[in-house]
């Protein structure tokens, strides 16, 4: 808990200059908003890339007006070439996984709300925190720069399997400078996340205010804490892997390239490396990354659902333990990405069982959510709709994990659109719904203004139905053997699947357009929204106890709060209504104190 | 709005299940001896995943319908059995379900990967390179000549880097751009990558295996139905990845012998 040294570290005077206030800010709240802004730019960039990919897949010969301006070689007369398709795909995935799904639910919301939810003035290392954002921003710039180098970005997919990624230009357009920029960007990104994770962990462990035991932390805080533990270990492996990849390009090493490879009739000057080594290093990061994207969403959604249901979850502890179990198991299952990679087939079985086991904590979490809905007093808001949508999406994306966890079935489904449907639903869309839910819920506290609820609900309906229309058919395509990462479908057995691709493309464009309603709502409400009261959702955790909205520079004014209750005391009779705030000394009959 | 949401969830869940139940889009029919086990495992998994999916979505929808926006006098109720009951249900039911899937699935995996090919299995080598497969048959001597990577040259059509002038074993090796195999004969496929990662996927054969540059891996299977099937690459290998394919012709033994003779004559 709070000690004096940590207190001294987090304390810093309010900034006076514009640059210190808005650019190189030390304030966790500003840094949180900066991360959110970065994720917002990234998500729209990623979405436009997905549109280009979808249009190309459905109508390959259709010229896209203006695209030739972005790349003369990649899209002559606006028609996307096969290599440019792969480059767009790689950038779409990299932007979305790293700069949206990692930054928004974890770094953006976590930065803004974790210190407030534990009752701290700021993070313990504000300079590291500022660096973490600017390092991440630099990583984004480095990645985007690859659009403007002569060969364009890398085409190797976000997984960057070696030796395609390691032998250089000879492997194809973008495999020289494009890969180097990609790997440099990700290595830099890892530094930012390591600094962020360090801050999150220390904030949670050291800066909790008086009365805030670990079990009294809200579930959102637990989500960020667990994620930061994963981040610290997973990014620490990816960063050196990326550095080794760069060395294979620039220093003549052969970490990931074996001997006797022949490309373009040229024997490659490498020997002794292992292609599977890259896959092991990448997926040792890659699978925890799935949970880095989704666990904060689980925390946020639990937090929003509880407030909307006006009751705590059936068990606070069980949810925390289950999220923790997901984090631990996530390191033991990564090999399920490699069942047909040529890895020892015995290892495949060894990875298969923990993968199947991970279903158990996932199921417990879903059952606790659904079981807690029973007998609740559910309030329907844009935030709660997205939270419930998250539950539905997580179930839909989760059950397809049953298939991919089994090596024998993976023989049929590996590298098909089934996998694309699975991870988009469980990691992409579900996490996005978590971000939306968090945005509608916390926007009043972050900006002091309310978002438009009606627009929020319209946004939800179009997004919910739209994403099912996009991603459920992916599963059918995969079951029919439709291979992913193809820029066109030339195999005889895929011809009958092309109408499905056209349907998905139309759904993707429509659902993407609906996101502009959100963007409008976000920007309009920021400046013209109704002023927000301090606690619009009648919630209990500390972020709703700040003396002003948005919170002041040091979050709680002159006096830090004291915590008297578990985080979710709803369904009680108190002077405020059916809830007691964590910082309220009011003693009421609280049937939900969990020991 | 909550009731509308509940109905929407149920409609989406049911609509999602319809193409599965109607078998609208499914894998091409199996033509292998080991594929039945995989198909059976797939059906079992589909049944269990399908029930879990529908049950979770429908119960979610019912609770949203029933418990949203209640009157001010409504009281909070707890799910019968509480968290304990749900945790036990998850541990017992889902635990048993996934363990059963895992254990039975092992059989299908073992059939392909833990059983060595029969001694009389026919060896065929496949080499993957950007963006084509080439197949090699050992000829009458039953031995493959060594590969010399420095001799690989697409222009002179020496796809494998063979040196028949100096290597006795290479003299009668037969290299073809298409794969032909006799029906009902076990094939021992030796997989070699020339350059980057590729994969060998024939949905009808129920096989998919990556080529690992620097590490030759093998696969064995028996095709049971004469016909022409596509071999496609499923591991991203560069700009021509989408177009990297070859045909597998499964023939009667007599037709295969004729085919092999013709190919030998063309070397």
Image (cartoon, coloured by chain):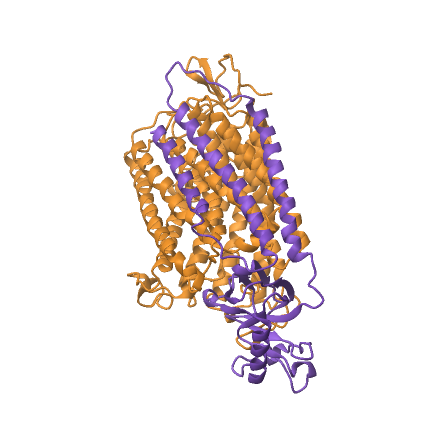
Chain colours: A orange, B purple
- Whether residue A404 appears in this view of the structure is no
The extreme bottom residue here reads B165
Q: Camera-side residue: B113 or A342?
A: B113
Name the side, left or right, on which A555 lies relative to A55: right
Q: Camera-side residue: B234 or A315?
A: B234
Q: Residue at x 48, y 52 (%)?
A: A479
- Whether residue B212 appears in this view of the structure is yes
Q: Quadrant of the C terminus of chain A?
A: top right
Q: In which quadrant of the rendered view does residue B143 lie? A: bottom right
Q: In which quadrant of the rendered view does residue B112 lie? A: bottom right
Q: Quadrant of the N terminus of chain A?
A: top right
Q: Residue B39 location, x and y as percent? A: 56, 51
Name the side, left or right, on which B39 lies relative to A138: right
Total numbered labels: 0
Q: Residue A566 location, x and y as percent? A: 53, 22
Name the side, left or right, on which A365 lies relative to A549: right
Q: Residue B247 location, x and y as percent? A: 51, 69
Q: Residue A54 location, x and y as percent? A: 37, 55
Name the side, left or right, on which B165 lies relative to A76: right
Q: Camera-side residue: B167 or A43?
A: B167
Q: Camera-side residue: A464 or A497?
A: A497
The extreme right residue here reads B119
């Amino acid at each position: 808990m709070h000690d004096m040294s940590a207190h001294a570290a987090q304390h810093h005077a309010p900034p006076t200059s514009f640059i210190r206030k808005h650019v190189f800010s030390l304030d966790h709240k500003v840094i949180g908003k900066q991360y959110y802004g970065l994720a917002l730019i990234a998500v729209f960039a990623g979405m436009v890339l997905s549109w280009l990919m979808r249009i190309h897949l459905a109508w390959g010969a259709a010229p896209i007006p203006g695209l030739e301006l972005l790349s003369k070689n990649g899209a002559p007369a606006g028609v996307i070439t096969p290599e440019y398709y792969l480059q767009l795909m790689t950038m779409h995935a990299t932007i979305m996984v790293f700069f949206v799904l990692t930054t928004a639910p974890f770094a953006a919301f976590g930065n803004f709300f974790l210190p407030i939810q534990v009752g701290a003035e700021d993070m313990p290392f504000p300079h590291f925190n500022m660096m973490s954002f600017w390092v991440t921003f630099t990583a984004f710039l480095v990645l985007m720069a690859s659009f403007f180098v002569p060969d364009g970005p890398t085409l190797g997919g976000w997984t960057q399997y070696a030796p395609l990624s390691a032998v250089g230009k000879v492997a194809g357009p973008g495999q020289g400078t494009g890969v180097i920029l990609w790997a440099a960007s990700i290595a830099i990104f890892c530094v930012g996340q390591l600094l962020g994770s360090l801050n999150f962990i220390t904030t949670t462990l050291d800066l909790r205010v008086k009365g805030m035991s670990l079990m009294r932390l809200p579930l959102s805080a637990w989500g960020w804490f667990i994620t930061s533990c994963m981040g610290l270990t997973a990014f620490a492996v990816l960063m050196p892997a990326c550095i080794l990849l760069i060395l294979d390009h620039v220093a003549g090493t052969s970490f990931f390239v074996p001997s006797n490879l022949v490309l373009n009739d040229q024997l490659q000057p490498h020997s002794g490396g292992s292609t599977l080594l890259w896959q092991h290093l990448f997926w040792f990061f890659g699978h925890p990354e799935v949970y880095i994207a989704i666990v904060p969403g689980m925390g946020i959604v639990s937090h929003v659902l509880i407030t909307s249901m006006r009751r705590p979850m059936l068990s606070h502890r069980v949810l925390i333990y289950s999220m923790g179990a997901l984090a631990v198991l996530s390191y033991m299952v990564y090999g399920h990405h490699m069942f047909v990679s040529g890895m020892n087939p015995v290892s495949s079985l060894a990875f298969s069982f923990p993968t199947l086991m991970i279903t158990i904590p996932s199921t417990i979490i879903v059952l606790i959510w659904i079981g807690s809905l029973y007998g609740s007093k559910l309030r329907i808001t844009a935030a709660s709709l997205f939270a419930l949508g998250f539950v539905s999406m997580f179930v839909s994306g989760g059950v397809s994990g049953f298939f991919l966890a089994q090596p024998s079935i993976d023989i049929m489904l590996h590298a098909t659109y089934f996998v694309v449907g699975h991870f988009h639903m469980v990691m992409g869309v579900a996490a996005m719904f978590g971000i939306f839910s968090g945005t509608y819920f916390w926007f009043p506290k972050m900006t002091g203004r309310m978002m438009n609820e009606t627009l929020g609900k319209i946004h939800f309906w179009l997004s919910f139905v739209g994403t099912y229309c996009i991603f459920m058919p992916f599963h059918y395509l995969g079951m029919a053997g439709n291979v992913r990462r193809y820029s066109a479908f030339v195999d005889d057995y895929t011809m009958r699947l092309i109408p499905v691709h056209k349907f998905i493309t139309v759904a993707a464009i429509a659902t993407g357009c609906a996101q502009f309603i959100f963007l409008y709502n976000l920007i309009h409400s920021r400046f013209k929204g109704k002023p927000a009261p301090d606690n619009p959702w009648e919630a209990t955790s500390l972020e709703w106890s700040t003396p002003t909205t948005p919170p002041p520079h040091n979050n709680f004014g002159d006096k830090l709060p004291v915590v008297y209750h578990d985080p979710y005391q709803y369904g009680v009779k108190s002077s405020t209504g059916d809830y007691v705030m964590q910082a309220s000394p009011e003693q009421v009959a609280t049937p939900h104190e969990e020991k | 709005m909550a009731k509308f949401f509940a109905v929407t969830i149920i409609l989406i869940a049911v609509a999602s299940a319809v193409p599965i139940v109607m078998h609208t889009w499914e894998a091409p029919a199996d033509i292998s001896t080991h594929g039945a086990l995989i198909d059976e495992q797939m059906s079992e998994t589909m049944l269990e995943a399908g029930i879990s999916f529908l049950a979770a979505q429908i119960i979610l929808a019912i609770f949203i319908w029933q418990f949203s926006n209640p009157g001010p006098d409504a009281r909070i109720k707890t799910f019968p059995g509480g968290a304990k009951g749900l945790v036990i249900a998850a541990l017992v039911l889902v635990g048993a379900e996934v363990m059963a899937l895992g254990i039975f699935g092992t059989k299908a995996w073992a059939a392909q990967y833990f059983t060595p090919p029969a001694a009389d299995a026919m060896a065929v080598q496949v080499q993957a390179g950007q963006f084509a497969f080439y197949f090699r048959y050992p000829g009458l001597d039953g031995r493959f000549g060594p590969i010399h990577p420095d001799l690989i040259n697409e222009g002179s059509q020496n796809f494998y880097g063979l040196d028949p002038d100096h290597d006795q074993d290479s003299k009668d090796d037969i290299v073809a751009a298409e794969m032909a195999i006799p029906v009902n004969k076990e094939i021992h496929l030796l997989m070699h990558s020339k350059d980057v990662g590729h994969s060998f996927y024939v949905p009808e054969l129920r096989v998919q295996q990556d080529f690992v540059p620097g590490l030759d891996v093998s696969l064995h299977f028996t095709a049971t139905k004469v016909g022409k099937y596509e071999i496609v690459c499923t591991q991203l290998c560069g700009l021509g990845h989408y177009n990297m394919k070859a045909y597998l012709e499964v023939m009667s033994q007599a037709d295969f012998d004729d085919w092999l003779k013709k190919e030998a004559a063309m070397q």
